[in-house]
Amino acid sequence: MNRTFIRVVDLYKRFGDVVALDGVTLDIFFNEILVVLGENGSGKSTLAKVLYGVYVPDRGKIIVDGSEARFSSPFDAKKKGFVMISQRPQLIDDLSILENIALFIGEPPSGTLAKRIEDFLKRFDIGIDVHKKVFSISYTEKQFIELAKALLINPRLLIVDEAATYLPQDLKTKFFEILRRFVSDNRAVIYITHKIPEALEIGNRFVVLRRGKVARVFNGAANPSELRHAMFGTEEYLKLVSRQLLQRLSKDSKNVLSVDKLVVLDDYGKTAVDGLSIDVRAGEIVSIVGVAGNGEKELGEAIAGLRKASSGSVKIDGFDVTKSPPSERTRKGLVYIPEDPFKEGTAVTLSIIENMRMYARERLSQDVVLDAIKKLGIVPENPAIQVSKLSGGNVQKVSISRLLLTMPKVVVAHNPTRMLDERSRALVLDILQRFSLSGGGVLLITEDVDEAVQISDKVAVMVDGRIAKLFEGGNLESFRSEIEKAMVHG
Ligand SMILES: Nc1ncnc2c1ncn2[C@@H]1O[C@H](COP(=O)(O)OP(=O)(O)O)[C@@H](O)[C@H]1O
Ligand SMILES: [Mg+2]
């Protein structure tokens, strides 16, 4: 028997012209993991923030244990036992792990608390000194600190807004085990994601949001095809991927990017890229796949001119740019799409159109801007909206638009589809393929083996700053398991 824990009734929330929640009604039962699934910009985070008291809804009710709860801040929500963790860690960089958690749960940073936190982290094989400052720890560690922080206040509802989505699979599995154990004792989890496989892995029931409305509820089993239809109204986009390869296979075109024996250091002065060489010809898509932390980020930054090369060289369209600033590389025909669209990809305090003008270095007509917005499926289709007001995937799409607004010779893109829903991902992979069909070169640096094998001519596996293996020719999909093995074992 499903017993109702929380009822969400007719929630409505608008921001200016955008209706983010448009009459959302749903029930959350005890002992369940309820997945809320939806494309980028469908209203998932807004729903989470209303439930956590960050936003006050314009209309509608939240009923907890049969009576109405009104939250005017997360403080009120926490008193009801609601906690939220999200994609971006909410930690203060200059404080230690212990101080951060103490602050959140309202206890002094005592030795006993330190022990409790360390015991919790040990369950994930994360052995970390809790006196370390937060700025020195990895994204994955931060997310487990967030989970520890949330669970230490002993909540009844845990809202997980894409907080596990970007963890490595082995740690994600552990994260999920904790969530399953957590809900077994008269509690609940709302698990928010745009990724269908992840939803199916963790969910007991599924609510699909589309343009701020509940499109469909699955009380029990769901399959990918039904979920796609509920999310996007179609699965036609699946055809965009993996079909243009045969038309292209490059001739003897010239190199638009040559990286030769490149050595690059990381932020701590350790060798991150260790004498790596790779070429990309006009009309070719070359992927570099690797587990995060193997130097792929430093490689991208060194090609873009954002990080110094210690030795070796980078040529764009035949010109040696090893010592050139980023602007010079742009002039020679490089477009770099960084991994983090918030930090490096966009100016978040500017509007969509202002960002696009910055990329293009010129005044763009409203038509050109709207066309880019449509091609990338940016939601909402409003050029004047400030980028900070967009959902994560849409910020990523704004960052990617630079590829459409200039006429580059070569594009270097680092995890460009990581934050994107399935349809947006297909649109972006299609854009990359069209670009290469028109004679551009693409270096795709990615953790996503699927996209690498689907669209590339060559796949290079990067381990410890070097190319461990190169796969090329024919159907790269047949090398998938070999590629995955090489990513771990070199
Ligand atoms: N603070 C805000 N100001 C203006 N618009 C916002 C704000 N927060 C969200 N939106 C808009 O509301 C819609 C839903 O966003 P969001 O809930 O973040 O989507 P999701 O989490 O499903 O990707 C988007 O169109 C987004 O641009
Ligand atoms: Mg979101």
Image: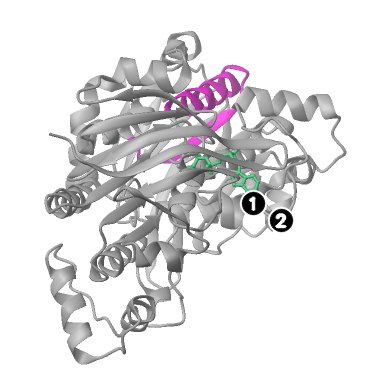
Identified by mark 2, the residue type is Thr
Mark 1, residue position: 388
Mark 2, residue position: 349
Left or right: where 442 falls relative to 305: left
Residue at x 54%, y 28% (from the top left corner) = 211
Quarter occupied by the N terminus: top left
- The part of the chain drawn in magenta is 422-448
Identified by mark 1, the residue type is Ser
173 lies above or below 383 = below
Q: Secondary structure at mark 1?
A: helix
In the rendered image, residue 407, in percent from the top left (x then y), is placed at 72, 30
Callout 1–callout 2 Cβ contact below 8 Å: yes
Residue at x 47%, y 15% (from the top left corner) = 233
- The foreground one among 11 and 288 is 11
Asked if residue 428 lies in the magenta stretch, the reply is: yes
34 lies above or below 100 = above
Q: Quadrant of residue 2?
A: top left
Left or right: where 352 falls relative to 107: right
View quadrant of ligand 1? top right
- The foreground one among 146 and 157 is 157
In the rendered image, residue 453, in percent from the top left (x then y), is placed at 34, 26
The Cα atoms of the two marked residues, 1 and 2, are separated by 6 Å
Left or right: where 107 falls relative to 437: left
In the rendered image, residue 451, in percent from the top left (x then y), is placed at 38, 29
Label 2, residues with CA under 10 Å away: few <14, some 14-19, many ≥20: few
Q: Residue furthest front?
A: 67
Q: Secondary structure at mark 2?
A: loop
Q: Is mark 1 within 8 Å of ligand 1?
A: yes
